[in-house]
Amino acid sequence: MRAPSGTKWPTLDPGTYPADVRRVHIQADDRVPFAQSVTYVQAARAAGQPTQLLEVHGDHFSQTETASMEWPVVITALNELTGAG
């Protein structure tokens, strides 16, 4: 999972970031395959990185819309990661 040559991120390899990761993804996403997040999470865990995949419902943008039913999942994940709330 390396970034294309010349991009601003030299690597996208799972497990290379010293932080817990939460991937919030919609299984029915019609733009980004859900399997992409599954593969990332599996690779990150295999590399020893604490990672969770949080599946939500809705469409591609639901997880970023503050009025959506999915938004609380994002806020809960952020609170867990930062120790807030």
Image: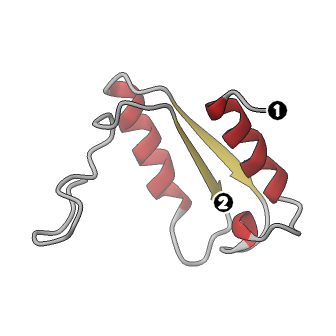
Q: Where is residue 44? Give x, y as percent.
A: 38, 34
Where does the C terminus fall, quadrant-wise?
top right
Q: Amino acid at mark 2?
A: Gln
Q: Amino acid at mark 1?
A: Gly
Residue placed most toward the observer, 36 or 49: 49
Relative to 9, residue 51 above or below: above
For the residue labelled by badge 1, is the local secondary structure a helix, a strand or a loop?
loop
Image quadrant of residue 69? bottom right
Q: Which residue is mark 1?
A: 85
Horizontal side of 3 relative to 83 (left or right) equals left
Q: Where is residue 39? Give x, y as percent.
A: 42, 46
Horizontal side of 67 relative to 19 (left or right) equals right
Q: Where is residue 70? Give x, y as percent.
A: 81, 58
Residue occupying image coordinates x 60% and y 77%: 30
Q: CA distance from mark 2 to mark 1?
A: 27 Å
Q: Earlier in the sequence, mark 2 or mark 1?
A: 2
Horizontal side of 52 relative to 5 (left or right) equals right
Residue 24: assigned label: none
